[in-house]
Amino acid sequence: MGADKEQRRIVDASLLRATVEQFVERSMHPAADIRQFEKLALGLIDIVDSETAARVALPLCFHPETPASIFGRLFDKGGAAAALAFQFAPNLARRDMIVAAEKGPAQFAAAIARRRDLDRETMLALASRSEREVRRALAGNLSAHFDSASRRALVMAARDDLALARMLLDRDDLDLDPEPLFLAASRLERMAIVLSACRQILASGATEAPLRADADVVAKVEAAAQRHDRGAMAALLSEALECRKDRARAIVADHLGEAFALALSAIGVPLESATRIISAYPSSEPSADVVRALTGLIRSTPQRAAARIVSAMTGAARPECETSRRPTREDSGALTWRRATPTQSLPRPSRKLDQSA
């Protein structure tokens, strides 16, 4: 029975290919021939799979007399066929674009990247999808002007996709919150983010007693660092920060070290212990300059500012007093994170911290 089904599939694909080839041989057709082709082609598109329909129907995209119903039927099939229709039917209705953003598979990514007419609802539907290819294509579409909801959806997804995070950071036209993107930021960008967070904390005026990590937790982190046990360190950070383990692993694996240093500060590891942990971890011992720079970062960054950035990276909720007011472009003298870039950066490490956590 399986062989019969496969034979039928081959025959149907051959019939559709022959029908399409016969139609595109001539640039003009009588109206009766177009109607006959339309009826036959629609029936065959219905019974072949999406990949076959897309492959065979491609020549129709360049023929001036291809009936619009062909694109509609390809669109309805989803998958590669829908992506083909999405790319070559520029007059798709807004409703159809939103449907395309909400249903088909990741094949839509390539077509989406070339669209210049994406409306706000479509962009939000695309930004909220789970496929990395779709979100990266959307972020790379320089014609797309995202509203706050779409920006927020992309930024939140970028916590777990450093390539997407880097694409967003590279777009100077986006007014975005960079704190969740800290792991993808360059050295100077990171220092700008830290300075901006410090400014926000100081502007809030709130004063709270510093958080101190439990001595047993500190001892366990130190012991894991001495053993070069990245898995144990990530597990301890995950529990202390109340975040997903994969995000704690990403912080431990941070090749520049600032995210890990800020995390130690955020959970209340004393400076002396943090210095020993940074010095002992990983197996390739960092240089004295790097240890000094990272401990200097801990010393100079208010704990609440460190906690703010780490919470953004891990997805933990920020305290209301820290999120109630962020400077806007209309604020006189407001200092955005991009403009906060310091004149000097931390010394560049002579060896990269291990990324294999």
Image (cartoon, grey):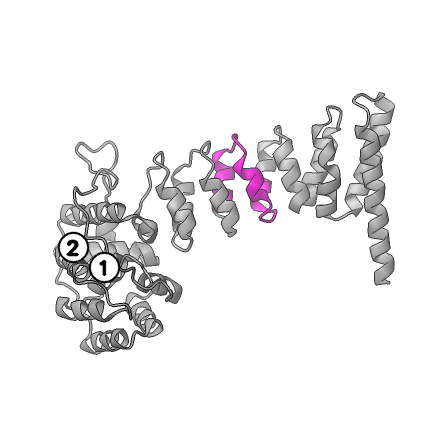
Q: Is residue 343 visible?
A: yes
Residue 301 marker: 2
**Looking at numbered disc 1 in the image, what kind of residue is underneath it?**
Leu
SS class of the residue under badge 2? loop
Q: Earlier in the sequence, mark 1 or mark 2?
A: 1
Which residue is at a point 81% across and 39% down the rendered structure image? 17
Image x and y of residue 132, in percent: 49, 50
User: Dots 1 and 2: beta carbons under 8 Å?
Assistant: yes
Q: Which is the main secondary structure of the residues drawn in magenta?
A: helix
Identify whether 260 is placed above or below 336. below
- Which image quarter holds the C terminus? bottom left
Q: CA distance from mark 1 to mark 2?
A: 8 Å
Image x and y of residue 195, in percent: 19, 47
Q: Is residue 152 visible?
A: no
Residue 247, by quadrant, is bottom left
Task: Say left or right for 228 vs 75.
Answer: left
196 inside magenta stretch: no
Which residue is at a point 26% across and 73% down the rendered structure image? 225
- Which image quarter holds the N terminus? bottom right
How crowded is the residue under tag 1: few (<14 C-alpha within 10 Å), some, or many (20+)? many
What residue is shown with label 1? Answer: 262
Image x and y of residue 254, in percent: 31, 59
SS class of the residue under badge 1? helix
**Looking at numbered disc 2 in the image, what kind of residue is underneath it?**
Thr
Task: Say left or right for 307 vs 90.
Answer: left
123 inside magenta stretch: yes
- Looking at the rendering, the stretch of residues picked out in magenta corresponds to 98-127
